[in-house]
Amino acid sequence: MSAGCTGALRGGILYLTLDSPGSSVNVVTPALAAELEARLATGLAASARAVVLQSAKQGSFVNGASLLLAASTRPDGPGAQRAYGLRRAYAALAAAPVPTIAVVEGNCYGCGLELALTCDYRIARDSYDTHFYMTELRDYAIVPFFGGTQRLPPLLGLRTAMEVLLGERVDARRALRIGLTDRLAPIAGVETEVRALLSTLRARKWPKRHSGRSRASSAPDFARLPGPERPLATEYLQLARLPFAPGYRLDDGLRAENASFWRSVATDEARHAMSFFFVRQAAKAHGIGSASYERPERLALSVREDNPSLRQLARILSMRRLPGIELRTKGTLAFAAQPVRGAFTCILGTGPRSGGDCTALLPLPGEALPVIELVPASEETPWRRGAALFQVLEQAGFAPVVTRAADRFVSERLIAAFRNAVGSEPARQDLLEFGYRLPRALARAVRAGGSGSGIAERVSAAVASECIRALDEGALTHPSQADLLAHLLFGFPVARGGVLGHVASGSSAAAAGAGRVLGRLQR
Amino acid sequence: MVRSRRHDPELFPEVRQALEVLVPKKLRKRITPQASILADLGLDSLKVVELTVLLEKQLGRPVFLPEWIASVEDPADLTVESLARFLADQR
């Protein structure tokens, strides 16, 4: 059985196809990397003129590295040896004497983006699920390990590279504009675009890429970053400046990145953030019974634009362009203000439990990753019937959360609790220093100033208290949903773990309740 | 550290039962106390999450595996036995 990378030589071109076994997304494992390295060597020995690196998964180029790598914390342990073996595969691809092309269809995250960066050329499919995202800072509070800080700056210029490194999500169109990719392929025309690039390369006698644009432009201002992200962002910037120094050698830059990486993974912030990955996935598994990223191959979707919420949803969905998802007037899945006969209906724009198969709320529709709270009409737990809806929304760039809200949506309650706790006090600086990354709609409602007032802790306790009430009432069915909502709605920092754990370890009046719902006071 | 292997650790039956749902059929005979959950049984991080949900159902309480994951320096040392012990210690 393949470990996740097959190779085929056709017409002198080596096609390397990523297909992680037993997983809905591609995940870089030591075995996959070893296989990639071996297939590459075989293909090059057979005189391949170019290499095309592609994915067999519908919505994933590469989503990340396996836990077997990601949970290693010591630079000299066996975990690290596996990680170094993996980096050898990246180096081999970067050193290939023939042109290499990454064909990116689907999520290209973290080490996946870094893998695409080892190639000379990049083609991206023009759909939302094809987006580029460096996960390391925002999701894991660590430094990249596979060359991101060294390969992005020469390609994009310092300023844009820093924006990407700090966690901006870049869709396929923007990727082309900023120079992260070389070509944009329509959903149905990826192969054509690959053939066109290969013909161009053939006509030019198979050139490798020449060095990228080197612009040591100014760095972004870190003052607006949440407090816990700033020290790491400063370290990123030091690394990102290296490629512009005279006499720079990539190997030296990679060594510096490596040293920073091992320092970063050993911090409490990184441990908390790693826990948060599980919080996020646990909330999903409790919601729909699976943590995977599968969605139907083809799905007809309809949105009846009967109210402002539905119009907003329709606008976002039509911009997101998902392969296999057709927006039609009649679909098997419908968003509407009233139940639609013959369709699985999600009622949007009214209260929870107002009919259909589920009701939903978009509390902050203007965000890059808008939360959508889903309340099933049935008592089915987990809500397997809603899995297709959940997966489509997730891959279209929403953050779905399943709750059992009764009279009011849980996200409405939490936002009210948040606003109430902030009140009219100057709080913006204190919340930022603590690590809150507020959505624009909420940030506007918070007065500037307030450093050192301790309001962030009070706000966290108020949000936790409302979560505890929702858990006790059964509106939330698992603590992970509470932690996820606090992160999605207010940007509660992953470097502090979940809001409940944070509050449980503090001394506020909510500490005991938080400990209780986390099951920590049972002994 | 040498530990007595005479008895299966407490909660091993519960952990095995949950793993049997997630581990591919041909790997199931490898579910022993010493098996590494990632390296030998082939679970990925999403499967570890699903393992959490199954264990919570069986044990009737929240389970926080990140603390277990953070308890080893090499993730290959995340064995079935260490998970059973972690769960027993959490009570």
Image (cartoon, coloured by chain):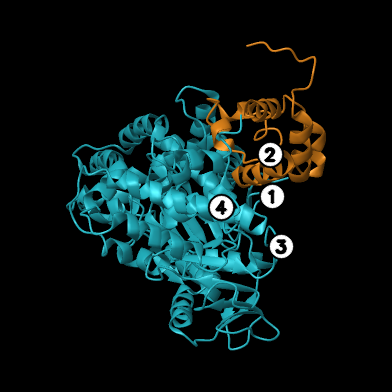
Q: Percent from the top left, x then y, of residue B80?
A: 70, 29
Q: Amino acid at mark 4?
A: Leu
SS at badge 2: loop
The answer to whether residue A107 is above or below residue A96 is below
SS at badge 4: helix
Which of the marked residues, 4 or 3, is nearer the chain's N terminus? 3
For the residues labelled 4 and 3, say whether their Cβ atoms are less than 8 Å apart: no
The quadrant of the image that shows the N terminus of chain B is: top right
Q: Amino acid at mark 3?
A: Glu
In this figure, which residue is indicated by the disc labeled 1?
A: A22
In this figure, which residue is indicated by the disc labeled 2?
A: B42
Q: Chain of mark 2?
A: B
Q: Nearer the viewer, mark 2 or mark 3?
A: 3
SS at badge 3: loop
Q: Amino acid at mark 1?
A: Gly
Which of the marked residues, 1 or 3, is nearer the chain's N terminus? 1
> Can residue A138 be seen from the camera position used here?
yes
Horizontal arrangement in the rendering, residue B33 relative to residue A263 (left or right): right
Horizontal arrangement in the rendering, residue A316 relative to residue A220 (left or right): right
